[in-house]
Image (cartoon, rainbow, N blue to C red):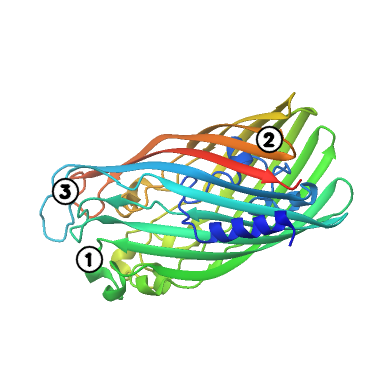
């Protein structure tokens, strides 16, 4: 077996057993692959790396043969603050005042990509990468159940791709995305009276589900100065989390939302590129994520078809990135992205468990090629953001809840075989 291919298989196997935990644009990564992270996730119109399956499969037609493995050190810092004492009135659910920080603050985020030339006009690639949730771990009984209170959502994607050159400047690609996800939650015993299945509401073993969807993409070099790219990922239909059928709407259903991305790459010179992308993730189409807490909590029990969810809105993110290639096979990158966070002020109570409130990312990165190999680094700073709203299960004006989050991400990858 060829050494590069054998190394690629070993790398893929290691990533398949690694944990996936990410939370930045909602619960999706702001970018896939170290180069794209260095440009704040921009690059749908650039053949950047072998992780094209995760963003725009059509770009793989112009990547060529390449293997890539990387890992990120992801540091999300989350806390919530409750202001105001509980009223104690019958039928209310006041929380204990104070600030509580989540204790889970560092996660390894691996990724792997490989691309092979089938012939001059067709390539086959595969990528393995992770998404995930807030992974909150509060050392208290936030909702008067067990302590700690929190949840862990992890997702692993396997994305094989076929990309075809339509001509020397245009390509299309298709990726059947296979997904595996795991979930566990603790501390929700107080919501048992509102659940359709209290035994499958909280504090059970880790639940898993399988499913998938399809991503399609287009890439075109419209001139020497301009490239265009676009991709669409269908909703990923997933099996139910059976151990949490009394929590998530539609009997434990937790599908992965559809998303689309479009962008351009402007090339004033051969060495300098400006990438501009827009991306939208359709969280509101997933009942367990998009259904509001109220009035759903009183109209249908948790786990029912119309059961309460986290009330997330769709997220549209604007990304801009720069890449400058200099002498000595160096490449320098920077980027900025902004996307309005998905949590409405009325939904802060349940989202203590999943405070995905980040809006702004600033990134920097670089690559160096040496002896036919490439090392790439990227640093991401996601600025602190908070959302403040009333406790919807208390007397109006009695209590407010402040959700806050900031993040760091340090990513390194190694590529060879090109």
Q: Is residue 11 visible?
A: yes
Return the x and y of residue 120 as percentages of the image width and height.
Answer: 88, 54
Few, some or many residues within 10 Å of mark 2 (<14, 14–19, 20+): many
Find disc 2 in the rendering and name its residue. Answer: 275
Does 383 sit above or below residue 68? Answer: above
Dividing the picture into quarters, in which one does residue 367 lie? top right
First in sequence: mark 1 vs mark 3: 3
Between disc 3 and disc 2, whose residue precedes? 3
Left or right? Give the position of 90 relative to 154: left
Q: Do tag 1 and tag 3 residues touch (Cβ < 8 Å)?
A: no
Q: Name the secondary structure under disc 2.
A: strand
From the image, which quarter does the C terminus lie in?
top right
Q: How many marks?
A: 3
Q: Are marks 3 and 2 in contact (CB under 8 Å)?
A: no
Residue 228 disc label: none
In the rendered image, which residue does mark 1 sit on? Answer: 189
Q: Residue at x 40, y 75 (%)?
A: 242
Residue 96: numbered disc: 3
Q: Residues within 10 Å of mark 3 (few under 14, many from 20)?
A: some
Q: Position of residue 247 (x, y in %)?
A: 34, 68
As measured in the structure, the alpha-carbon distance from the residue carrying label 3 to the one carrying label 2 is 47 Å
């Amino acid at each position: 077996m060829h050494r590069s291919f054998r190394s690629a298989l070993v790398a893929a196997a290691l990533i398949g057993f690694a944990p996936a935990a990410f939370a930045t644009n909602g619960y999706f990564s702001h970018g896939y692959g170290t180069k794209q992270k260095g440009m704040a996730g921009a690059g749908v119109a650039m053949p950047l790396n072998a992780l094209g399956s995760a963003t725009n499969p059509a770009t793989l037609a112009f990547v060529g043969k390449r293997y890539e493995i990387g890992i990120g050190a992801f540091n999300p810092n989350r806390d919530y603050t409750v202001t105001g004492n509980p009223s104690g009135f019958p039928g209310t659910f006041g929380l204990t005042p104070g600030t509580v920080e989540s204790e889970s603050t560092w996660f390894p985020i691996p990724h792997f990509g490989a691309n092979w030339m089938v012939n001059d006009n067709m390539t086959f690639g595969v990528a393995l990468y992770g998404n995930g949730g807030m992974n909150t771990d509060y050392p208290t009984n936030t909702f008067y159940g067990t302590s700690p209170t929190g949840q862990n959502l992890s997702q692993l994607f396997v994305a094989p791709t076929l990309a075809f050159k339509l001509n020397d400047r245009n390509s299309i690609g298709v990726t059947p995305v296979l997904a595996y996800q795991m979930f566990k939650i603790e501390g929700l015993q107080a919501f048992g009276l509102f659940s359709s299945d209290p035994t499958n509401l909280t504090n059970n073993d880790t639940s898993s589900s399988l499913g998938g969807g399809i991503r399609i993409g287009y890439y075109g070099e419209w001139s020497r100065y301009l490239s265009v790219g676009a991709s669409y990922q269908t909703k990923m239909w997933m099996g139910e989390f059976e151990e949490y059928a009394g929590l998530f709407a539609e009997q434990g259903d937790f599908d992965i939302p559809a998303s689309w991305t479009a962008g351009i790459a402007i090339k004033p010179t051969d060495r300098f590129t400006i990438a501009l992308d827009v991306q939208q993730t359709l969280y509101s189409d997933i009942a367990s994520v998009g259904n509001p807490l109220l009035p759903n909590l009183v109209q249908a029990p948790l786990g029912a078809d119309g059961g309460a969810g986290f009330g997330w809105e769709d997220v549209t993110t604007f990304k801009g990135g720069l890449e400058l290639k200099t002498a000595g096979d160096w490449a320098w990158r920077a980027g900025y992205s902004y996307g309005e966070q998905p949590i409405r002020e009325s939904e802060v109570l349940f989202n203590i468990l999943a405070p995905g409130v980040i809006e702004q990312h600033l990134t920097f990165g670089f690559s160096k090629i040496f002896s036919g190999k490439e090392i790439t680094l990227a640093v991401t700073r996601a600025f602190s953001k908070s959302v403040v709203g009333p406790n919807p299960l208390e007397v109006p004006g009695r209590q407010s809840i402040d959700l806050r989050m900031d993040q760091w991400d340090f990513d390194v990858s190694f590529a060879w075989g090109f």
